[in-house]
Each structure stands twice: as C-alpha cells, then as structure tokens.
Amino acid sequence: MTGTMIKEFRLPDLGEGLTESEIVAWKVGVGDTVTLNQIIAEVETAKAVVELPSPFAGVVTALHEQPGTVVEVGKPIVSFEIAGDDGDGAGEEPAKREPNLVGYGAVLESSGRPARRARSFAAGAATAAAPMAPVAPVAPTIEAAEAPAPADDSAAPAPSGSRAAERPRSTPPVRKLARDLGVDLTAITGTGEHGLITRDDVRNFVGEGDLPQAPRELAGGPTGAPAVVQGERETRTPIKGVRKFTAAAMVSSAFTAPHVTEFLTVDVTPTMELLARLKAGRAFAGYKLTPLTLVSKAVLIALRNHPTLNARWDEASQEIVQFNYVNLGIAAATPRGLTVPNIKDTDRMSLLELSTALTELTETARAGKTAPADLTGGTISITNIGVFGIDAGTPILNPGEAAILALGAVRKMPWAYQDEVALRQVMTLSLSFDHRLVDGEQGSRFLQDLGTILADPGMALAMV
C-alpha cells in the first residue's frame, strides 16, 4: 500500500568543501506543493548566492531555518511530505533529485553529514590548493577553505591553580556564533553527541539572561539572524559570506606568496583614440567598449611572450604549473563584497567576444548572481582601481595565481611627446607577481610589452 512519508533535506556542500551557508530567502512556504528541481531557496556561500533546487516532489511541511541564519552543512533546512511506501514493499521509490549543482555530491539519502576534504591552513588563514579568483586586491579560490574559527583561548581561561581547561567541543560555526555573542563556551554544557556544543546550546544560554543586552540583540530576533548592533561610539556587523572568505584568502595570499609590485606610467592616448574610433564604427555598434576591454586584450597578447605570469605554484607537488589557456579574472565590487569572477579561455576570444563577456560578467556580478563555477579556475587577474579615481596601488594576488594587474585612472597630463611637452592621456599600471614563479626580469618585460601595446596599439601586430 502506498502512503506518504516525511523527508528532510539537509544543506549540501555547495562549493567544494564549504562548511556553512546563509539562508538568503525562501522561495516556498509551508503547505506549498513543489516539483522536482524547483527552486526552493537562495543561499549565500562564501563565494556567491546560489539557487537551491528541491531534491523531492511533494509538499513542504516545515522550514527549519529562517532567512539570515547561517546553517552548517548537513543540517536539515526543509522537510517534505512525499509519496512513499507504507512498509509492505508495494510502493514506488519517491522521485529524488540527481545532482546538478557544483559541489552538490551524491543524492542526499543518508542522515549523516557530507564528508569534507582535509584542509591545511597557514598563518591562521586558509591556504589555496587550486587557482582562482574571490575573491584584486584578491578573492578566494574555490579550493581555499574558509578558515575555521580558532579556539578562543582568551575567552576560556583555566581556573586558578589548575591545568588549562580542555577546549570545549564545538564546530567552527558554533564557535563563531559564541564569539559574536560574547559567550564563554566553557560555561556551556553541550547537548549534542558526545557533549558537542550546538547552536541551540549557545542560543539557550543567551536566553537565560547571562549576557548583557547588546549581545542578546546581536543574536537577532525570532529568526536568530545576526543583526547589526549600533551603539553610541561604534557599530558592529558580523563578518560572514563573501567578505569573510575574501579576508581569509587575502591573508593567506599575503603571507604565503612573496609579492613584488612594479609600476609603469604610460601615454595611452593612442589607445584612447582607438577606443573612440571603435565605438563609432559599425562593427561595435551596440557593444560596450571601455579602456578595460582594450587593456584586457593587450594583457592576453603580452602573455603569449611571457607565459610565466600565467602559472601557479603547486606547493604539495613542488611543481610550477604552466597554464596553456587564460581564464581572465576581473575584480568586481558587489553589494556582498569584492569578488573576482573569471572568463574562461579568453585567449581564444576576439575583441567582440571579449567585450560581450566582460559586460555579462560585470552585470551578473553586480546582481549577485555569479555562478560558483565562474569564481574558480582563474589564471591571472585585473582590477580596475581607476574607476575610483586612483592612480596606482599594490594589489594582492589571488591565491593560486602568479600575477594581478591594477589599472589606474586615465588622466590628462603634461607629457613629453615628439620632443615637446603636450597634454596627453596617461595611465599607471601596477603589476604584482609571485616572485617564486616570476623573476624581476620576466615581470618587467611583461609590463614593458604591455605598456608598448597601450602606447601604440599597432605594435600588437608584431607580437601576435
């Protein structure tokens, strides 16, 4: 006999080993009938906002987490009532969602938590194991794990005259919640398996009145979502999502790769004149052309003669990995923080194709809809600080990449031109590179060739 059964959907690993995600919004409510693969929620990982498809066809019976809540991977988030077998073996297996999302893993039938890959950390932050984005200054790679919260030793002093107390058993998200709320984990008795301290344990402790009003407000309202706490002299905002992951990746990059930054100021008047002609031409009618478009193309041309800048350092195997393709990362400021999505195989693109890809990348990133796949696998990046009126800087490398270029503002300045001083359009290029991979000579020659192309675009014909 066929009846119904309740199935829980547990939050899957949405991005190669991420430990948690935040519920941004539910697209369904209790009592709604959903179909297989129907979008039921938006969740924010440390890399992007992802639409979550339903793994079952049935009726929603419970939403276990409210929007704004950071949920640990493997924790139930929604329950469904679905058609099932009453137990006599006559029923059919309910429809289950096959994996179709990056990092989704196998069909979620097990009640256990998904297995996670081992991670290593350096200087208190995550270490990248594969190239990327992140993330320009820098953004995270999909392989760069979000650094677990360290033990809060300062919050758990050992009793006087005794040995240091054993660190309370808890998970990184729970330790983060405790720090946000100002809770001493040693004062809590865990109700989880083997004494594990859970989120509910921390929240229950807060509800007992052991904390001052400000931390209690930080715990959020009925949803339990972290909230901004504003006092007379300071404002506190929980660090999470893209900003948290970017911070970990920046620290990792700064302390694992020896950065060198070189600067070159170039008369880009010919490039700006070319840009104006292209915009006025029929071939580019309807396309969005910017200085970034032409600089990106110039970078791709210069890389052909300087492939060492399109590589990564593989610490585990002690090898230099040379990429025979270019996935160009472009830093993008978004409402959720800095990300560096990349365009795959840009070395094979025409200027028209590159223009289209850059426009789509920017619009998608600003809308917060960048797919996780577009935030991983970058090989070299560009950050356009000139749009903020900045002339030069020292950009931090994306973990797993050998170089990043910062574009300064294009300014009209007095400049030596044909043995006279003339008003010209000038730009400063700032190139940071990993000195383990790129020697000073190699970095300098790449920057020189790039400057040559921008000062005289016709020279690109001699480099192709």
Image: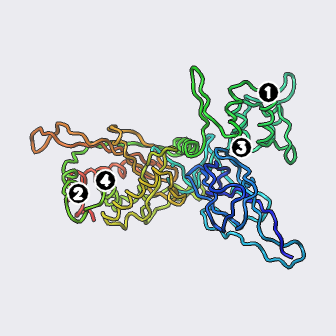
Label whose residue precedes the other's in the sequence (4 or 3): 3
C-alpha distance separating marks 1 and 2: 65 Å
Q: Quadrant of residue 27?
A: bottom right
Q: What's the distance in space between the residues labelled 3 and 2, CA to CA?
A: 52 Å
Identify the amino acid type marked 1: Gly
Q: CA distance from mark 4 to mark 2?
A: 15 Å
Residue tagged 3: 172
How far apart are the two marked residues, 4 and 3, measured between alpha carbons?
42 Å
Residue 102 screen position, x and y as percent:
60, 63
Amino acid at dot 2: Lys
Q: Is residue 114 visible?
A: no
- Distance from Cα at disc 3 to Cα at disc 1: 24 Å
Q: Earlier in the sequence, mark 3 or mark 1?
A: 3
Image label count: 4
Q: Which residue is under mark 1?
A: 209
Category of crowding for the residue at label 2, using alpha-carbon neighbours closer than 10 angstroms: few (below 14), some (14–19), many (at least 20):
some
Q: Is residue 94 left or right of residue 362?
A: right
Camera-side residue of 23 and 116: 23
Q: Residue at x 49, y 53 (%)?
A: 133
Q: Which residue is mark 2?
A: 279
Is residue 332 rendered to the left or right of residue 175? left
